[in-house]
Amino acid sequence: MKSRICGTGSMLPNRVVTNDDLSKIMDTSDEWIRSRTGICSRHLAVEESLTELAAQASRKALEEAGVKPEELDMILAATLSADKLLPCLSCELQRELGAVNAVAFDINAACSGFMFALQTADMYIKSGQCQRILVVGGEILSKLMDWNDRSTCVLFGDGAGAAVVRADEEYGILSSVQGSDGAKGDALLCEGRRNNNPYVSNSTDLPYVSMNGQEVYKFAVRTVPKAILEALQKADLTVEDVDLFVLHQANIRIIESVSKRLKVPMEKFPSNLEECGNISAGSVPILLDYVNQRGMLHKGDKIVLAGFGAGLTWGASVLTW
Ligand code: UT7
């Protein structure tokens, strides 16, 4: 049995913020951001909640899949920026969608989150425990940014993407690879709430994302091609067999480096980095929906999905569309 993606959806917040907009409020420039990352603008949530964005993305994915919310066995949401600590985003989505028969829980593997959620869904389907699973990745990272730290806040954006996965005899996920290296966790970090029981002298500092960009960059260009090759080998395929590589969108230079290392032309690496920036766990499902809605995926195509990020974590899957 395979796990087939049979519907996708995505939703971005209304507010578009360009590099020029940012250069009016901090010491940065369109030239720096564009040339170092490939990002030109990003969507930032002003009115929207993550639950709303994820619910709208999910409704689109369910509609394309022809699956009713009450037919879902499971909802898996990947995020590090849920609206609430409790309940989790998946349970909020269950309520919003009326997915009364689903079991719902979140997965936090940062920018690899959607890959880990998809791979978890695959295991539930392969084991026969579930038939239809909604997998969501989404973030409102702008609330975790230090807007005085130009080295991080210009990189990230907000949004959500969703995919409906169902059991299928023929099409679907062929192989997966996943990994983590907790020893390098400090490279991309956001502290949680501090201890604040009556016996602690509390600090009121708010935690924000901080990143050693160069370390994460080196990790990405080393690990992603390796993970993709491993996943392809497990599926008995080579890079030549792949029609499209849908990679986590962190930096166009990382994608170019992967393309070069795999000796695959950049045309096979679609990107929405220009308009979206890095949406962490939202990045892969939003890009997948982008290529799906533009008719770039055809039945039987071989697709590679890959993510990497904080943890450090990484994951790649090969599938037949
Ligand atoms: O999704 C999670 C995974 N995350 C990633 O994959 C991120 C990976 N890393 C990267 O994409 C890149 O390392 C960055 C885009 C984050 C940074 O690019 P870089 O080429 O490594 O730049 P840098 O950090 O070495 O900074 C170069 C210079 C510094 O100035 P000095 O010290 O050379 O004078 C920075 O202060 O650029 C300066 N700088 C900026 N200048 C204008 C840093 N941020 C900005 C900015 N605008 N926004």
Image (cartoon, rainbow, N blue to C red):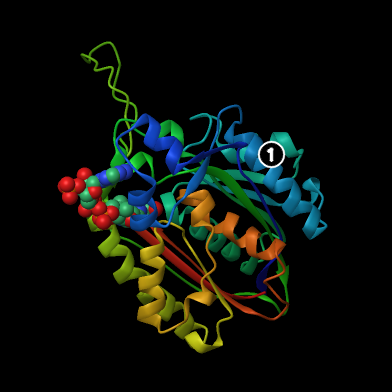
Q: Is residue 53 left or right of residue 142?
A: right
- Of residue 195 and residue 216, the one placed in the foreground of this image is 216
Query: Which residue bears the numbered disc 1?
Result: 94
Q: Amino acid at mark 1?
A: Gln
Q: Residue 210: x percent and y percent?
A: 28, 41
Q: Is residue 101 left or right of residue 288?
A: right
Q: Is residue 97 left or right of residue 231?
A: right
User: Is residue 280 depicted above or below 147 in this figure?
Assistant: below
The extreme top residue here reads 198
Q: Is mark 1 within 8 Å of ligand 1?
A: no
Q: Residue 307: x percent and y percent?
A: 45, 61
The residue shown at (43%, 44%) is: 156
- Rendering quarter of residue 24: top left
The residue shown at (44%, 31%) is: 143
Could you tell me if residue 186 is visible in this image? Answer: no
- Rendering quarter of residue 52: top right
Q: Residue 88: x percent and y percent?
A: 55, 36
- Of residue 248 and residue 154, the one placed in the foreground of this image is 154
The residue shown at (45%, 47%) is: 108
Instruction: Categorize mark 1 by other alpha carbons within 10 Å: few (<14), some (14-19), many (20+).
Output: many
Q: Residue 109: x percent and y percent?
A: 42, 51
Could you tell me if residue 294 is visible in this image? Answer: yes
For the C terminus, the image quarter is: bottom right
User: Is residue 9 depicted above or below 235 in this figure?
Assistant: above
Q: Is residue 137 left or right of residue 110?
A: right
Mark 1: secondary structure: helix
User: Is residue 293 depicted above or below 19 in this figure?
Assistant: below
- Of residue 13 and residue 187, the one placed in the foreground of this image is 13
User: Is residue 128 depicted above or below 263 in this figure?
Assistant: above
